[in-house]
Amino acid sequence: MKHRIGYLLVLVLTNALVAQTIVSIPDTTAYRGSVLTLPVRIDRAVLLDDTISVTFEYSQASLRIEQIAARFPSELRILRSAINPAPSAERGTATVEAIAVKVLPYLELDILCSVLWSGSSPASVTVSALEINHSAQLLSPEGGQITLLPAQALTVEGRASLGPLRPQPLYEPRLEVTYWLGDDGQPSFVLFDPLGREYGRWSAPPQSAGPHTIVLELERMATAAGVYYLRMQVGPHLRIAPCVIGK
């Protein structure tokens, strides 16, 4: 009888371990003010028309989640997503719901996020909940730690910083540019095409030290697909950031 109870206990524990779904997000390093794509792999097989719901938790003082997308839209169709920052809490949440377009051995998602000037390092993104066909799954999360450079949150320190630029890639006629002024100043912007030719110029009004956002209007008919570069000049200080433009 004791042997039978022991066997059943081992069987239950083994099944519990087997049922755990490994969710991996690679550890990485990112610069403050940059745009970062985090690949997510969920080691869980699904059938055609299975529904999937994934909830993420993230360090909202250091990161802003812009979008959660399927790595391959032909395999997994996103139904809806919701990003829920919680101003009074350390961590925000984001949920995505999708449906399998085909039988898949595992699931792959991409998280597009902006790395903020605030918050401490390291930041993290983890999967806190997974449902398949409305049935909760046991999770075994791996990775998701993001080392931020510089490690300390950026403060007014007499220099300018440029980024992030959104959206990326850009398919719209408007480019949203976020930047930081270390001192009062009047920034100007120049966008260069992939061959280094000047595409356009913009000037902002005089502004105080701190964070700012400006929207640059682009003539999309005059742009080709490729990596452009935006240069910001404030007095003698120059900052350059890449901008991926789609066609």
Image (spheres, helix red, strand yellow):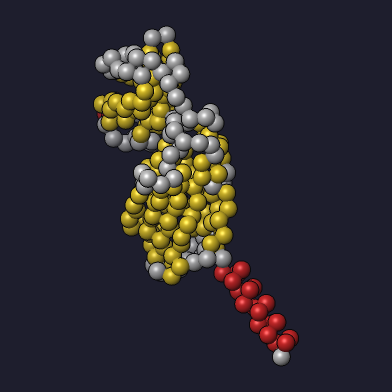
Residue situated in front as seen by the camera: 221 or 233: 233
Q: Residue furthest right?
A: 3
Q: Would you say 102 lies left or right of 205 here?
A: right
In the rendered image of this protein, does residue 145 appear above or below residue 138?
A: above
In the rendered image of this protein, does residue 135 appear above or below residue 211?
A: below
Q: Residue furthest top?
A: 236
Question: Which quadrant, please, contains the C terminus?
Answer: top left
Residue 203, quarter of the rendered image = top left
Q: Position of residue 2 (x, y in %)?
A: 72, 87
Residue 237, quarter of the rendered image = top left
Q: Residue at point 42% right, 37% down?
A: 114
Evaluate whether residue 89 shows in this view. yes
Q: Position of residue 84 (x, y in %)?
A: 35, 49
In the rendered image of this protein, does residue 192 appear above or below residue 20?
A: above
Question: Which quadrant, please, contains the N terminus?
Answer: bottom right
Evaluate whether residue 48 shows in this view. no
Q: Residue at point 40% right, 43% down?
A: 65
Residue situated in front as seen by the camera: 42 or 119: 119
Residue situated in front as seen by the camera: 170 or 4: 4
Q: Position of residue 39 (x, y in %)?
A: 50, 47
Q: Residue at point 60% right, 74% down?
A: 15
Q: Residue furthest front?
A: 88
Q: Residue at point 44% right, 47% down?
A: 91
Q: Position of residue 175 (x, y in %)?
A: 31, 30
Q: Would you say 215 lies left or right of 10 here?
A: left
Tally of numbered discs? 0
